[in-house]
Each structure stands twice: as C-alpha cells, then as structure tokens.
Amino acid sequence: MGSGQAVVVFGAYGHTGRFVVAELRDRGFVPVLSGRDAGKLEALAESFPGLEVRTASAGDPASLDRALAGAAAVVNCAGPFAATAAPVIEAALRAGVPYVDVAAEIEANADTFAHFAERARDAGAVVVPAMAFFGGLGDLLATAAMGDWTAADEVHVAYGLSGWRPTTGTRASGAVSHERRDGRRVRFTGGQLEYHHDALPSVKWAFPEPMGVRPVIGEFSMADVVTIPSHLAVPEVRSYMTVEAVEDLSAPGTPAPAAADERGRSDQTFLVEVVVRSGGEERRATASGRDIYAVSAPLAVEAVDRVLTGRTRTTGVASAGQIFDSADFLHALSAHLSFELRR
C-alpha cells in the first residue's frame, strides 16, 4: 500500500483525475490536488477533506516545481497532453520523482519517447506514458500474449465497447490530434507510423462470448501504435473499434459519461482482445470490465505503486509492458478487470 506517500495528481478535477485521486486514497497514498483552476481544485477538495491543494499551470515551471515539492511521484491527468506532458515531465525530472500519465494522444506519446528517452535514462528516472485504458492496457495484453517470443509478425488490438460517451477532455485531445495530423489518419505499418487519407475499413471481429461477432472499424488507431512497438519487435500493429463506439465518439451531441454506481462509474462495458501472430502461430489475451475512464485509475495507480516499491524492469521512458511484469500486473487488477491469457 501507499504508506502515506504524497502523489501529485495534475488535472485532479478532470473526469479521469477524480478517479485517480479516489484510487490513490484507497491504496493508502495521500493525493495532492493540482491543476490550473483554483476554483475547481477547491471544489474537489470539499469532496476529499484534508487533501492539500496546489494550483499550478503547465505554462509556469515555477508553479509546477512548487506543486511537486516533497512528493513521491506525479500522475498527469490533464489533457490535451500535447500541451501538458513535456512541462510536467520536465518538472518531474527537476524534482527527481517518477512521472506517470494517462495520455491517449498518439503524437503526445510519441513526443515523450522521442524527446525524453535519453535524458530520463541518463538520470535514472522513470517516465511511464499512456498508463491508461488506451495505450497501457493494450501494451500489457500484447506483452503478456507475446510471452517468450522475441518477435512477432503482427499485433491486433480489438476494442469491444458497449458505447462511448466521450469526456470534454477526450474531445479536446481529439481536436488537437486532428489538427496536428492535418486531418490525416495514422497507422503503424512496416515498422513505423504512417499518416494517410485512406478510408477506414469496416470489418467483423469475433470477440469472445458473450460479445460475439461484432462489426468494427479497422485501423482505428489508438496509443497502442506507440506503446507496443516501443519495445516489442513487431512491424504491424492494427487496432479495431466497435462501430457503435465510433458512432458515439463521432456524434457531436453524444453526452459525457454519467455516474451509474456509488464509485461514479458509468454503465459502459468493455472487452479488449489482443491477438499476436508469428508465422502460423497465434496467441491471445483479453481483458474485460466497466468504464474505460474509471479503469484508467487503477492502471495508473498500480504503476505508481510498483515504481515506488522497485518492482520495475528498466528506467527511462518506458511503456507499461516494458517496465512491468505484464501478466502479474494484470492479475493484480482483478478487482477492476478480468484478464485471460490463451497461448
């Protein structure tokens, strides 16, 4: 457990940030509420009496230094991460504390690897980007499925969502990514990210029961196209999203998630299946649970706990599957998701 260690949550009043704050408290950590909006921080503090508030802005390095002072780690939940990841990582490096974020933005995660890999490694620091439902979970599943294989021909990540009510942060991050890509789409093929204008294919995916065969949109790339090939020798990473989830995300009038239980989770369910293929062989791993935003909290907090207790395999910038024992990590989240490995 956290043993009372202070962990700064930057963007604590955001939708995912609130789940992270609650999860840290449940795990015995002391969250420090941080972000740029003092009013929202104070309102959040009313729900978590006794927690310290530290206002800080990504554009003000000194305020970030004050926010991280005396903390054991920082979790960045403030998107768009194109604007916040680099400044908060810089502050974490100055403070000498581990950094974890829940970024789903492909370009922001690629920037983290490109700009901080050498510096973080030389400093012996730990930077874990995309430690969330998109990016982290798929990477853990792919790594667990790979097992003792040192390379594979392709990885397929299929997202079976019952629907997708995007948060304001999701929409803002999506808009930033769309602008950075100049409206193009992205995929990982031939060992590299490729930007294109091709239409995305509509195919069918045979999910495990009870979901079964569902229509999906192919090449619906998420952060997995950065995290998985960052450490696995795989030239092709392809992802798929259920059609109803894509339609919800695309519709401007789709409402934000609504709490459906005492923990604040929505009634959304998910099933993620990863298939790794090498030659004529195939291995699979699946995870299922409820609420893609809520489940990002135990993913991020488990990462913090493992980093602070030395249960890591490397330093520098590293994705979940590279720095942690993937199967053990997923089994540790049994209270939040079901995990199955089929080799």
Image (cartoon, helix red, strand yellow):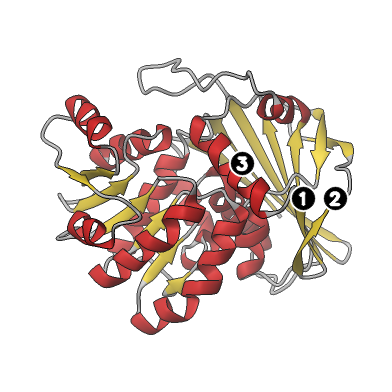
* Residue located at (77% from left, 70% from top): 191
**SS for tag 3?**
helix
Query: Amino acid type of disc 2?
Result: His
Q: Earlier in the sequence, mark 3 or mark 2?
A: 3
Q: In front here: 3 or 267? A: 267
Which quadrant is home to the C terminus?
Answer: bottom right
For this orientation, the residue located farthest to the bottom is 122
Answer left or right for 58 relative to 282: left
- Disc 3 and disc 1: Cα gap in Å? 13 Å
* Residue located at (62% from left, 55% from top): 106
Query: Amino acid type of disc 3?
Result: Ala
Q: Residues within 10 Å of mark 1 (few under 14, many from 20)?
A: some
Residue 187 on image: x %, y %: 77, 56
Residue beneath label 2, please?
197
Residue beneath label 1, please?
185
Contact, mark 1 vs mark 2 (Cβ under 8 Å)? yes
Residue beneath label 3, please?
175
- Disc 1 and disc 2: Cα gap in Å? 6 Å
Answer left or right for 314 relative to 213: left
Residue 47 on image: x %, y %: 21, 25
Residue 329: in sight, yes or no? yes
* Residue located at (30% from left, 43% from top): 36
Answer left or right for 74 relative to 228: left
What label does residue 265 carry, if any? none
